[in-house]
Amino acid sequence: MLSTRSDVYNRHGQRERAKDDGSDGKIVGGAEGRTRSLKRIDARTYEDMDKTNGKTTMTRRLVLAPDGKSATITMTGTNNDGKPVKNVVVFEKQ
């Protein structure tokens, strides 16, 4: 089975690294108690979660189309003000 690692650079240029094993990792440069996890659901689906003090605040699910020509990211949770968020973003290969 393949494993995936995600390297993301935050707004301060600091690298955040996550493995797809579902384990929580500290968000670099984030507030104390903030973590992120990345989990591979199947060959085309990934889910990552942001947590604050163990409570999930944002979930993102990325699904790649079977033909590889598009990807859909669905984000649900709460923003920094505690207000509900639900966004769907579709990327298409040009």
Image (tube, helix red, strand yellow):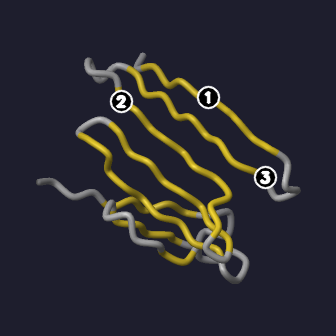
Q: Secondary structure at mark 3?
A: loop
73 lies left or right of 65 = right
First in sequence: mark 2 vs mark 3: 2
Mark 1 vs 2: CB contact within 8 A? no
**Mark 1, residues whose alpha carbon is within 10 Å: few (<14), some, or many (≥20)?**
few
Q: CA distance from mark 2 to mark 3?
A: 25 Å
- Answer with the quarter of the image where residue 26 lies: bottom right
Above or below, comparing residue 72 to residue 94 in the picture = below
The quadrant of the image that shows the N terminus is bottom left
Residue at image mark 1: 88
> Could you tell whether 7 is left or right of 27 in the image?
left
SS under mark 2? strand
Does residue 60 sit above or below 56 in this rendering?
above
Q: How many marks?
A: 3
Most distant residue in the right direction: 81
Please state which amino acid type lies under the numbered disc 1. Val
Residue 39, image x, y percentages: 37, 55
Q: Earlier in the sequence, mark 1 or mark 3?
A: 3
Name the disc covering residue 60, or none.
none
Q: Would you name the residue on which mark 3 appears? A: 79
Q: Residues within 10 Å of mark 2 (few under 14, many from 20)?
A: some
Q: Write the residue at 42% across / 58% down.
A: 38
Helix, strand, or loop for circle 1?
strand
Residue designated by label 2? 64
Q: What distance separates the C-alpha of mark 1 from that of mark 3? A: 15 Å
